[in-house]
Amino acid sequence: MQFRMIHNNFNVLDLSRSLKFYAEAFGMKEVRRIHAPDGSFIIVYLEDGSSTHQLELTWLRDRTEPYDLGEDEFHLAFRTDDYAAAHALHEKMGCICYENPAMGIYFVEDPDHYWLEVLPCR
């Protein structure tokens, strides 16, 4: 028996804002969308163009309060071929929330406060 990881889910309060963020910050594009027949939710799948792993963004119509993300002890990680340019972009966007220069990594925070790690190619 084999398993293959296919996606991670983040629930979001403002789908348009999240789609804009992931497109600008990581070049992710929508590849599929599911609408609930009753309008109660929308699910959007994003890809980075180089991996089959997807990020699933779920918007729930009746959700109005921010999600409890605990103590930010989980995250997604992205590797970049131009760390300096990525850092400059994220700095300009104002979304860097933590840096560890000794490890050569930093984290950005999306509009719903999910953390995303950025690593250089090694």
Image: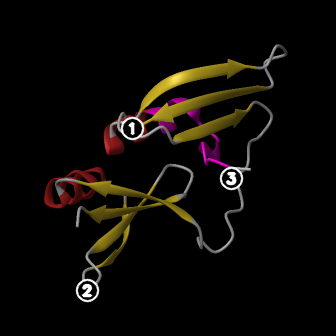
In the picture provided, is 51 more to the left or to the right than 74? left
Q: CA distance from mark 2 to mark 1?
A: 27 Å
Amino acid tagged 3: Pro
Residue type at mark 1? Asp
Query: Which of pointers 3 and 2 indicates the residue nearer the eye?
Result: 2
Q: Are marks 2 and 1 in contact (CB under 8 Å)?
A: no
Q: Tell me which amino acid carries mark 2.
A: Ala
- Work out whether mark 3 precedes mark 2 in sequence or the reverse, and give the earlier one: 3
x, y percentage for residue 97? Answer: 40, 68
Where residue 98 sits: x, y (%)?
Answer: 38, 73
Using a 10 Å C-alpha cutoff, classify the residue at mark 3 as few (fewer than 14 neighbours), some (14 to 19) or many (20 or more): few
Whichever of callouts 2 and 1 sits on the residue coming sooner in the sequence is 1
Taking 8 as reference, is 20 left or right? left
Cα separation, mark 3 vs mark 1, equals 26 Å
Quarter of the rendering containing residue 103: bottom left
Look at 57% across and 51% down and name the residue there.
112
Q: Which mark is residue 102?
A: 2
Instruction: Tell me where the magenta segment starts and ends, as one range.
Output: 3-19
To which residue does mark 1 refer?
48
* Residue hosting label 3: 66
Q: Nearer the viewer, mark 3 or mark 1?
A: 1
